[in-house]
Structures are given as C-alpha cells and as structure tokens.
Image (tube, rainbow, N blue to C red):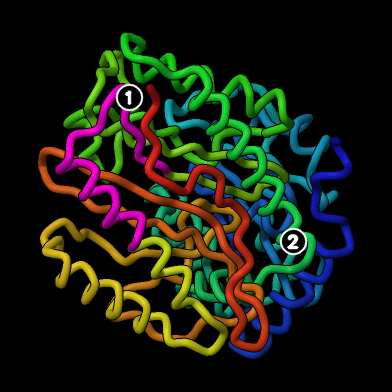
Amino acid sequence: MEDIYKIPEEEFEKRINKVKKQMSTRNLDMLFVFGTETESQNVRYLSDYWTAFESSAVLISLNSDPLLLIGPESFSYAKSRSMIPDIRRLLVFRESSEPDYPGVKLDCLKHIFEEVSGREKIKRLGIVGLNFMPFPIYKEIKKSLGNTEIIDASDILLSMRMIKSQNEIKLLKKASKIAEIGLKAVLENIRPGITELQVVGIALKSMYDAGMEHEALTMFVLGGTHSAHAIGRASHKILKEGEIIQLGVPAKIGGYCSSIGRPIVLGYIPKKIKEFLEVGLERENLVISLIREGVELKEVTIKTNEFLRKKGYERYFLYGPAHGIGLVECEHPFVESNSTGIFKENMTFNICAYLGNNQIGQRWEDAIRVVKGGNPPEEFSSYKREIVVIK
C-alpha cells in the first residue's frame, strides 16, 4: 500500500519545472513555498514532505535544484519521505515554544539565500503561503534579503493545483471510498445513548483499517443544537432520538482529501425536520445537475440560491454550495455568487451544501470531478445520499 497510494516521483519533477516556468514569466529569482502542520498542502505538492509540528518550505531557484527547508527535529523523518534530496534544518522553523537547541549545528536563511544565488543579488522573491506565515519567519526572510522585493505569489500554486492529474484523481477517489467505509460503519453502529465522540471513534477505526493516512479535517458528529454549527468539534454530548445529527466523515490518503456529509436522525423524524432535510437533499442534487464543463462558477450559486428563496430557506444560507477539493478538503476554486471563472475538465469539487440557523443545521457533502463535453460530473461518493432514519 505504501507505494500504491503515492504520487510518482516524475510528477513532482514536472511540478517543479512548471513552477520554474511561471517564475520566469514573472521575473522571480526565487520562490519560497511555505508550510505548517495545518497548512502543508503546497510543500507536499512539490516534495511529498508532510509537515509535522514544525514549519517547512521548498525553496526554488531558476538555476539550481530545489531545497527542502525544515525545523531542527525533522531531519530523519524528512529524509524518509521527501522527493527533494537536499534538506536543510533551520532554527527559525522550530516549534512554536521556541527551544534553543544549544550545540546543534543548524543552517540560517541568510547563508542559504547566498548559497543558492551564488551571492548574486536576489531582486525578486515570491512567497507562497504568505497568508499563514508567522511574523518571526517573515521578519527573518526580510532581514536575510535586505531590499529584495518580496511579493505574494500564492496564486502560482493555487492555479496549478486546480486542475488534477490522473494520479491525483485516483487518490481522491480512493479517499472518498474510504470515507464511505467510515460512514457505513457509523450507520451500522450509531444508537441513542452514545456520545458524539464515541461515533468519531467508530468511524476512525474503520477508515484506518481501510488504509486512511489521516483525517482530512476534524470529523463532525454534531447532534441536536450542535447540528447548527457550520464548523465544530464532536463532544461528550449524548445522542438522542428525533434530532438531527450532522455527520462529516473525512479521509486522507497520499495527501488527498475527501469528506462525505450526511444529516441523519435516530428513532423517528419529526415532520419539520424531514421537510428541512428534503430541501437540503434536493439542493445538493440540483448543484450536481448544474455543474458542467464551461458553466460559470457563479451561475451554480445564483441558481441554487433562487431555489432556496422559493423554498423559504434563504436565511439558512451561509456560503456557496461547492468548493475545490484536493490536498486540502476546502480549496480553490470556490463556487460563490461573486466567483469568476468556469468549470474546467478535471477540476474536483466537494458539494458542500450546508444550511442552518441557531437551532438546527445540515450538510450534504460529496466529491465530484468535472468531465469533458458538458456531461454530468463523475461522482466520487453517493452512499446513503437519502433521508436516513435509523430505527
């Protein structure tokens, strides 16, 4: 399984070369691709290094091989998985509690920039991940480079990652199948009287047994008034009959994510809840029916918002009904009423149809791929996309 569910080495090489072409077009001498444990997507996209605990970066120059920059404690781990063989340890990439590591020989950014540039002036540096870079690291970059122009170049990786390769699609489909296994385990074992957290345990065991490398995000098991949470965490709340339980079952494999969302009810379903869930289900199916190659992104949101208005649920709306999925469970492009752009072949999306107020909520969620020629999208998951009442 270790080799089956990985992006092959030659694809990483193609990605680096494509980045260099973009750098050349934009007159960038270097690109600094930053990552953290929670925002590891861009570093992993270029190196397969999955940041843990510390910070990391891929440093790309037009005229030399890339470097992987890591914290003091991650060297053996990085060597075991990085597709970039030249790895350097930096004190500034240490964990946030800031230990000193006295006596340990570490690199510094100034020397690395000088080495990679051949001591030539670095005129323009692009940074990917500037929006989540800690200030001490940004300050160290500025100090090391002097009057070098620094620009936000995150769009280089965002645009590259929007269109998926066949290897990426294979991993995304596998992640959805693992999430279906987790959902199935939950539906077979959930019952009144157990807690939200116990349900999380049921799902995670089944998904790890099926080969999952990690949750794609925190799993949602949100019962009763907790179902109104657009984002939340499972708790020790005891599940009861007759209330909505919002399930969000996420899996990751080879770095690629899935999440299946289903609202379910235990025991019996009150009439108002049934009507509410039926609107949400109809909305997800409408979203899928509207997504086609060449259709404007915003058109899907505008039409589904009109559907909600006619049904009397426009006040339950919080955000658009779909977003990209890949190395992050929620990534570009977003499907909103102000989105620009169109659906393109091999873009992948999670239909993420959340509705809620301060008392109840629901989310229907499944991954799809845009296919060629205006045909219906390929659906990566559809298990139990129906009103589920567990007796």
Q: Residue at x 39, y 61 (%)?
A: 284
- In the image, taking residue 288 as reference, residue 85 lies left or right, namely right
In which quarter of the view is residue 360 placed?
top left
Give the percent coordinates (x, y) of residue 349.
52, 64
Per the image, is 166 magenta? no
Answer above or below: position of 321 versus 193.
below
Can you see residue 107? Answer: no
In which quarter of the view is residue 45 placed?
bottom right
Quadrant housing the C terminus: top left
The amino acid marked with disc number 1 is Leu
> Start and end of the magenta stretch?
262-282
- In the image, taking residue 159 as reference, residue 29 lies left or right, namely right
Answer above or below: position of 219 versus 146.
above
Per the image, label 2 sits on a secondary structure element best described as helix
Quadrant housing the N terminus: top right
The amino acid marked with disc number 2 is Glu
- In the image, taking residue 8 as reference, residue 293 lies left or right, namely left
Label 2 belongs to which residue? 115
Answer above or below: position of 320 versus 277.
below
Give the percent coordinates (x, y) of residue 231.
30, 42
Q: Residue at x 35, y 64 (%)?
A: 321
Label 1 belongs to which residue? 266
Crowdedness near tag 1: few (<14), some (14–19) or many (≥20) residues, C-alpha within 10 Å:
some
Which one is nearer the viewer's eye here, 224 or 12?
Answer: 224
